[in-house]
Every structure is written in structure tokens, then in C-alpha cells.
């Protein structure tokens, strides 16, 4: 099976690194799926869940992260996701995200509402 090497990095840490067969992310041009052999690309990441179909030593599975802004770059079967903020779904406190969503709605804070919604969608595995 063909693989691509993926690096998901936030401004403050390396979030995830490994081999994958498919990565789906939201860009300013819309959702994009990257598989091994994809044409080189450079794009702007929008807030949204990133889904990584893992392979290799980590086994076949799925990693989902909530990503808020940044860049995506692919060349030579190496995919880099350079995010302003990124959280793996298993790091997200669901109750805290739900409270943040309700608070953002009551304060009419669209940006905070979007961040909380993305976190909850990442936990649910919804793209």
C-alpha cells in the first residue's frame, strides 16, 4: 500500500507524525483529500477537522484533529499541516467545548462559536 508521511504541527508543539494513506482537510478553496502521489500543493487551512487515515507502524486507523488556521503543503509524498492551533480529538474536553459553544452563542462571538464547533466535530469524527 502506498503511503505518505504526515506531520501535523501547531505553533507550540508537534501534534502528530506518521504514515497515512489519506488526509482530508479544509482549505480556503474547500475540502481537500491528499493521497500518495498527489500533485504538489500549498494552501491555506481553514478551521475544521483534519482526518488522517493511518498506516505503517501505528497500524490502520483514524486520527482526527481540530485545526484552526495555518497552511498545508504537499511534495514528494510528504504532507505538512502547519496549524496556528491543533488539538487531537482525544485531547478535547467535550464538556468544556460544549460550554464554550453555548457561551459564544450567547455573546454572539462567531469566531469562538466556530472554534468550539470544530472541536466538537473533531471529537465526533464528523468532517
Image (cartoon, rainbow, N blue to C red):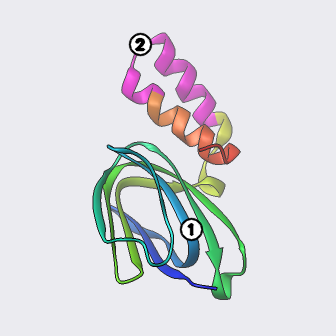
Q: How many marks?
A: 2
What label does residue 123 carry, if any? none
Residue lying farthest right?
Answer: 60
Q: Residues within 10 Å of mark 2 (few under 14, many from 20)?
A: few
Image quarter where the C terminus lies is: top right
116, 44: nearer the viewer: 44
Residue 23: say if magenta: no
51 relative to 107, above or below: below
* Left or right, residue 64 beside residue 74: right
Residue placed at 57% from the left, 75% from the top? 20
82, 20: nearer the viewer: 20
Image quarter where the N terminus lies is: bottom right
36 relative to 84, above or below: below
9, 72: nearer the viewer: 72
Q: Position of residue 23 (x, y in %)?
A: 52, 64
Residue 30: quarter of image = top left
Residue 21: quarter of image = bottom right
Q: Which residue is mark 1?
A: 22
Q: Position of residue 81 (x, y in %)?
A: 38, 64
41, 96: nearer the viewer: 41
Marks 2 and 1, the one that precedes in the sequence: 1
Q: Which residue is mark 2?
A: 108
103 relative to 77, above or below: above
**Residue range highlighted in magenta:** 96-113
Amino acid at each position: 500500500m502506498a503511503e505518505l508521511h504526515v506531520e501535523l504541527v501547531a505553533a507550540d508543539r508537534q501534534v502528530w507524525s506518521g504514515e497515512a494513506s489519506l488526509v482530508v482537510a479544509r482549505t480556503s478553496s474547500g475540502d481537500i483529500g491528499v493521497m500518495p502521489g498527489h500533485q504538489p500543493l500549498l494552501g491555506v487551512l481553514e478551521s475544521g477537522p483534519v482526518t488522517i487515515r493511518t498506516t505503517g507502524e501505528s497500524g490502520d486507523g483514524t486520527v482526527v484533529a481540530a485545526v484552526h488556521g495555518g497552511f498545508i503543503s504537499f511534495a514528494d509524498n510528504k504532507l505538512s499541516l502547519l496549524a496556528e492551533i491543533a488539538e487531537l480529538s482525544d485531547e478535547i474536553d467535550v464538556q468544556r467545548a460544549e460550554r464554550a459553544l453555548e457561551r459564544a452563542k450567547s455573546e454572539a462571538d462567531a469566531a469562538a462559536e466556530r472554534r468550539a464547533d470544530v472541536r466538537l466535530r473533531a471529537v465526533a469524527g464528523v468532517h
